[in-house]
Image (cartoon, rainbow, N blue to C red):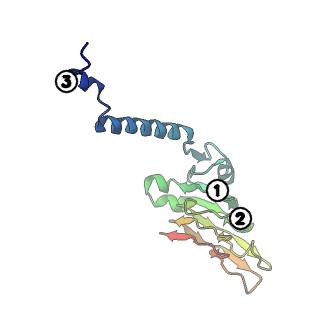
Amino acid sequence: ANNEISANEKKVCRPINEKGIIMHRFAIYCIIILILLSSTSVANIIHVPGDMNTIQAGIDASVYGDTVLVSPGTYYENINFNGKNIVLGSLFITTGDTSYISRTVIDGNKQGTVVTFESGEDSTAVLSGFMVTNGYIEGSPSLTNTAAGIFCTNEAGPILDNLRICNNETKGHEYFLGGGAFCGNKSYPKFHN
């Protein structure tokens, strides 16, 4: 019995080459990525008034990364993002048509601040393409009522994009800080127009 290995047998017994190891690792990485992608949630679009009757109901139903898309109309409400890092926009955000800004109105009906960011919302919280109007604050200012139109506090840093902020009023105290908007207590919103 000859204990020598022929040249053909040596090729069969060789370890996996460098290219084979790379392909094996690539396949494992692909499987891991697929598992991660399948376990994450997909962002939803919530239509107002189609899916929800009010903007606040749309915000309340949303989760991180969702978009609340608002059709043209006047919405008499005072809204609060309540810490939700979502996009809230008129049809301006899908079309780029600036006429939607004046046709999609959040009207505070003189019942306080129209839009509030007070729970640490970050730059993934976006308000875009609205007219913000008829906010009204009267009396002594406090950390919860110093702006009639848009109020940002408690380290909130939303993006405020292509908004018309008009006809908002503070009254009754010389220290009110914003009829249109006020940003305090380490808040850092970004205004884009």
Q: Nearer the viewer, residue 146 or 13?
A: 13
* Residue of label 2: 109
Kindly identify the residue that appears in the image at 57 percent across and 49 percent down: 66
Label 2 to label 3, Cα distance in Å?
90 Å
Crowd rating for badge 3 (residues with CA inside 10 Å; few <14, some 14–19, many 20+): few
Query: Residue 42: x, y in percent?
Result: 54, 42
Is residue 179 left or right of 9 when viewed as pictured? Answer: right
* Residue of label 3: 7
Q: Is residue 115 visible?
A: no
Kindly identify the residue that appears in the image at 40 percent across and 35 percent down: 27
Is residue 166 left or right of 172 when viewed as pictured? Answer: left
Query: Residue 163: x, y in percent?
Result: 54, 66
Mark in the foreground, 2 or 1: 1
Kindly identify the residue that appears in the image at 56 percent across and 39 percent down: 39
Answer above or below: position of 50 versus 182.
above
Tag on residue 84? 1
Q: Quadrant of residue 175?
A: bottom right
Query: Residue 162: x, y in percent?
Result: 50, 65
What amino acid is at disc 1? Lys
* Residue that sits furthest to the right in the current view: 139
